[in-house]
């Protein structure tokens, strides 16, 4: 009996080691893509380059910060859709999946999540402003109070 209990406990521990959530591979893939997005030059744009891009191209500018952060200051012509609300406000995004878009947050992290989400929706011409609004203001670029 003792041997049976030990065998059952050992089997339980072994099977528990293999019991992983079904989304684990997807979660890891998403984390890897977000990490890649934060490093990839083709998905990021510096604040000064973004300023020039905004002046020349007039992209859809998406601020994914919270309302209070936006109210303290933002880039002119930015549309506020907080990251937590993005899924429910897709209708406010450009219908053209090739439309130029820039995403930003406070320091770049939420912006990267927004960028990845927009890429998953099929947007082809979207980049995150590297360093977010903090980097923008550090460069002395214009803001709206």
Image: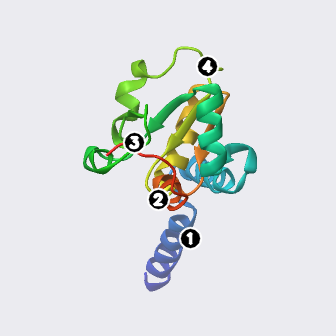
Label 3: few (<14), some (14–19) or many (≥20) C-alpha neighbours in 10 Å:
some
Q: Earlier in the sequence, mark 2 or mark 4?
A: 4
Residue linked to disc 2 = 134
Q: Position of residue 28 (x, y in %)?
A: 60, 54
Quadrant showing the N terminus: bottom left
Q: Are marks 4 and 3 in contact (CB under 8 Å)?
A: no
Q: Earlier in the sequence, mark 2 or mark 1?
A: 1
Left or right of 39 in this view: 31: left
Q: Nearer the viewer, residue 57 or 60?
A: 57
Residue linked to disc 3 = 83
Give the answer, above or below, for where 9 lies relative to 123: below
Residue linked to disc 1 = 14
Give the answer, above or below, for where 119 lies relative to 46: above
Q: Are marks 3 and 2 in contact (CB under 8 Å)?
A: no
Q: Nearer the viewer, residue 38 or 1?
A: 38
Q: Position of residue 142 (x, y in %)?
A: 47, 46
Q: Position of residue 78 (x, y in %)?
A: 43, 34
């Amino acid at each position: 009996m003792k041997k049976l209990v030990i065998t059952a406990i050992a089997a339980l521990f072994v099977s528990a080691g293999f019991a992983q959530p079904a989304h684990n591979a997807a979660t890891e893939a998403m984390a890897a893509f977000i990490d890649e997005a934060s490093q990839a030059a083709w998905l990021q744009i510096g604040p000064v380059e973004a300023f020039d891009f905004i002046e020349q191209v007039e992209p859809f500018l998406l601020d994914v910060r919270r309302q209070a952060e936006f109210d303290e200051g933002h880039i002119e012509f930015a549309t506020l859709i907080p990251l937590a609300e993005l899924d429910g406000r897709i209708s406010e995004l450009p219908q053209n999946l090739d439309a130029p878009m820039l995403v930003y947050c406070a320091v770049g992290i939420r912006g990267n999540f927004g960028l990845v989400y927009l890429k998953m929706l099929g947007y082809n011409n979207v980049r995150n402003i590297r360093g977010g609004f903090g980097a923008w203001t550090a460069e002395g670029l214009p803001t709206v109070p």
